[in-house]
Amino acid sequence: MEYASTSPENQDLAKALDDRIGELSAVAHAALAQVAKASAEFDAIGGWAGGGIRRFQHWLTIKAGFDMHTAAELLRVGQAMSLLPKIAAAFGAGQLSFDKARQITTVATPATEEFLLEIARGASGAQLARICRSLRRIAEADAPEQADDHLSRRGIWTHWDEHGMLELTARLTPEDAAVVVAALESITGSQPVPDPADDGVKDPADDRWAARRVDALVAMCEHVVAGGAENLVTSTAARQVVVHVDAGVLTGEAEAGRCYIEGGAPLSAAAARRIGCDAEVVGVTERNGLPIDVGRKQRMVTDRLRLALHVRDGFCRFPGCGVPAYRTEAHHYDHWALGGETSLENLLLLCRFHHHRHHSGAFRIRKTPDGFSFETDDGHVIQPPPRDPVTVERHPDIGPDTPLSLWGGETMQFSYAVSVIADACEFAEARAAPPN
C-alpha cells in the first residue's frame, strides 16, 4: 500500500504503524472472542450470582469495566458462538472484530453461517452493519405482525420546551416516511447547506441543515393552510444560480476572460466547469457587456437521466467513498462545453467533495472498458489493493492483515447485494429444513 499523503521519509514509519495497528487489532479481536466464550460459560453456571449482583451484565461492568450494553452483547455473542462454530473460529482467530461478530450473529443460523461468514470477512465493519440491519428489516417485514406493529407505533407528539419552542417527535411507517422525506427534499434539496455569504444577515441556527428542514416543513404547512398556493414547492431543478462564463475560458481556448456568480463573486474556470456538469444552462451572447441574444434553457442532466445514474452508481464513484447517490452531483467525463454528451455513458456520480477535488486537479479520471478508473497525476490507480481470499479453515497466525476486510471498502450496490444475500439465506434455510 502507498501512503500518498505521507512524506517520503515517513513512508517506512507509516507502513510499520499500518502493520502494527492491524496486528494489535487482530490480537484484541481474538481476546474478546475468548471473553465472549467465557462469559457464556460463566453465565450458564450462574457464577455471577450473589452479593447483590442483579444479572451477568451487572457483574461484568464491575469485573471488567464494560458498560451494560457491551456486556449484554458479549454474553449474547458468546451464547451464539456455541451454535455457529465457523463464525466462532473466525472471531477467535482475530479475523472478525467484535463489532462484526455481534452484527453477523444477529442474522446467521447454522444453515447460513458459512455463506454469511464470507460476507463478514469481505465487508468493512460499516458495510456489514448496514447489510445485517437490512437483513433484520427484511425478516421483520415478512413477520405477519409487522404491519400492525408499525401502525400501532406511528404518531406525532408535541411538547413546548422551556425556551417556548415547540418540539415535534414523529414516528412514521417506512412508506409514509419516504413521502415526508421526498416532500422535504423537494424544497431543501438533498445537499448540505453551504456557508452563507458575509452579507450581514446570517442564519444563527446551531444546525443550519436541520433549520432548513424546519423551514421546509413550515413552508409545506403554509401551502396547505393557504389552500394550495401554486409553485410554492419546487424541485431542485427549478432553482437557479446564475454564473457568467466567457466561453473561451470554459473550453480552454482562451486564457483571458472571467467567470463569476451573478452579484460579482469570482469563480475559477474549474469551478464553472464543475457547476456546469449538473445544471440548467441558458446561453446569453453579450457585446460590450450587453446581452444581444438569449438561447433556450437546457437541463444538462434531466431528472430521468439522474434517476438512471442513481440506479447505476448508487454512491459516489470515487474508490472507497460511501456518499449515497442522492447526495452526489453528476459529472461529465468529457465536459459538455468541449462537446461532451450529456448521456449515461459520459456521466458518473461524485460527491461534492470529490467533485471539487477533481476539478481542482487533485486526481484524474480515465474511461476504461469496465467503467471509470481514478488515478493520481503520476498514473497510480487509486483503489484498495487486491487481496487473496483467506479461508477460515486455515486458521493463519495473527498478522497485520488478519482482520482486513477483504473487499477493501469498495462501494457496493447495497439494495442489490442485500437482495442477493437474503435470497441466498432463504435458499440455505430451505435446503437445511427437514423434508416434509
Image (spheres, rainbow, N blue to C red):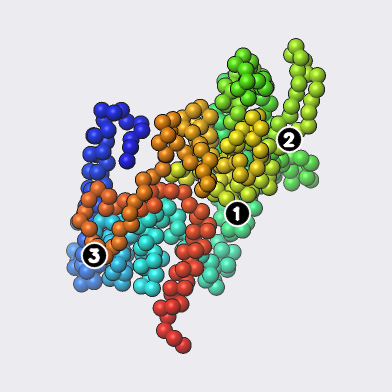
Mark 3 and mark 1 in contact (Cβ < 8 Å)? no
Q: Residue under circle 3? A: 37
Q: x, y percentage for residue 251?
A: 63, 25
Dot 3 crowding, Cα within 10 Å, few <14, some 14–19, many 20+? many
Judged from this view, the residue extending furthest toward the top is 288
Q: Nearer the viewer, residue 2 or 110?
A: 2
Q: x, y percentage for residue 255?
A: 60, 16
Q: Nearer the viewer, residue 55 or 305?
A: 305
Q: Residue under circle 2? A: 298
Amino acid type at circle 2 is Gln
For marks 1 and 3, the one nearer the N-term is 3
For marks 3 and 2, the one nearer the N-term is 3
Q: x, y percentage for residue 186?
A: 66, 43
Amino acid type at circle 1 is Ala
Q: Which mark is residue 244?
A: none
Q: Report, in whole angstroms, how far the alpha carbon at label 1 lies from the one at label 3.
A: 41 Å
State which mark lies toward you, 3 or 2: 2
